[in-house]
Amino acid sequence: MIGFPLWGVIWAKNQTGYIHTLEIYDSMVDVLGKRKKFCLMWGLVKEMELKGYISLVTMSKVMRRLARAGQYEDAIEAFRGMENFGVSKDIEALNTLMDALVKEGSVEHAHSVFMEFKDCMPADPRSFNILIHGYCKARKLDDARKIMDEMEKHGFQPNVVSYSCFIESYCKSKDFRNANATLDEMQEKGCKPNVITYTIIMLALGKAKQVNEALEVYDKMKRNECVPDSSFYSSLIYILGQSGRLKDAWDVFEDMEKQGIRRDLLTYKTMITSACNHSQEDNALKLLQRMEEDSCKPDIQTYAPLLKMCCKKKRMKNGKLEHACFFFKETVLKGMIPEDGTYKMLLEVLEKNDTTEAKEKIQKLMLRAKGQNPI
DNA sequence: TGATCTCGAT
């Protein structure tokens, strides 16, 4: 019924810890959907139905995968037939469908399905925000505003999420004047911006090379007694690193502990990338060690900048080359596939240095990485 | 809990 590699995935997941049978089934549905094996996916859903295993989580995976494949109508059909599988077709389920349609690129389908069902299930603030998000993402601000008016007509005040969507849209088009105007407007209406709102503006300003303005957002946030989180700090470190203020980036990184904010994978990745971009190899390596001690598991993007930094040095000394090979090996041993570009770069350097043995090792590792990958 | 996220070179 189900191919062998899929069981490999389940087995691998089980190795990482206890998973409830239900979760195993749900993740199988997700994997089949990811591979676009929709016939098998539906077969599994039917099997789950007999065992009474289907929940909204299952159906949301089904709808999300169908939407991702561009099969929007099929995703909507899955919602229509949801009750046949014993999952209630309520506003929560509709919101899940709309969210999947919006995130996979069709706010139009989300809107039409909303119009179809709004009379039989009362919309909640989330329903409206999902559509506002969709239209803002598609840069259709007039449509987003119409949804916001509709939201108010239904007796819901636009909240921090609604406003943040508009702010993000303005930021994407570098219209910081309107982004700030919206920030003022929401406060006038008694809606407090939160850490996500501030992160959106600060990061956008930083990316637009307006570093001082970005740091002003940080001050504004502190004045409004909004507490930063690890995502916010990661964005701040990113901006400081990008603008060449590596010392400040390090200060923020070290300060997090004092503020009682845990450094997560993103924080480490950002700091490692900053260190690599400034060719601080030793510090980058120390960070890698520190993150392991901090029980933070590196992923493929953690090694990419390290590998790149090592390969970049055209006339690489032996020590550096060893490091590069080490990062490559770590990537593969952790079950990830190094990027093709990095792979070619490393091979090129090894060739120049006339190290055939190491080159063969890397080639073998790459084969292993590709063969090991079940998806 | 609906909104943010580090992927660079073109």
Image: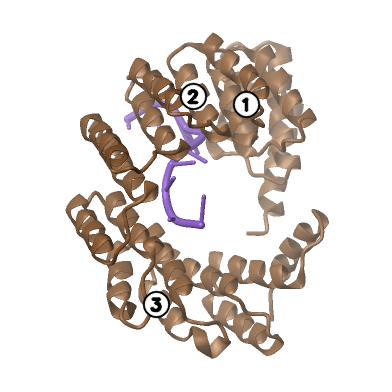
- Point 61% across, 72% down: residue: A29
Residue A200 on image: x %, y %: 39, 36
Q: Residue furthest left?
A: A142
Which quarter of the rendered picture does the C terminus of chain A lie within?
bottom right
Question: What residue sits right under mark 1 in the picture?
Answer: A307
Residue A203 as seen in the image, left or right of residue A1: left
Q: Chain B takes which shade in the image?
A: purple
Return the residue nearer the eye: A375 or A152.
A152
- Respond whether the residues carrying marks 3 and 1 are from the same subunit: yes
Q: Mark 1 or 2 closer to N-term?
A: 2
Q: Chain A takes which shade in the image?
A: brown
- Point 45% across, 22% down: residue: A239
Callout 3: chain? A
Label at residue A236: 2
Callout 1: chain? A
Label at residue A331: none
Q: Residue A363 occupies which quadrant of the picture?
A: top right
Q: Mark 3 or 1 closer to N-term?
A: 3
Which residue type carries mark 3? Ile
Return the residue nearer the eye: A365 or A292.
A292
Asked if residue A291 can be seen in this view, the reply is: yes
Question: What residue sits right under mark 3 in the picture?
Answer: A76
- Point 36% across, 50% down: residue: A159
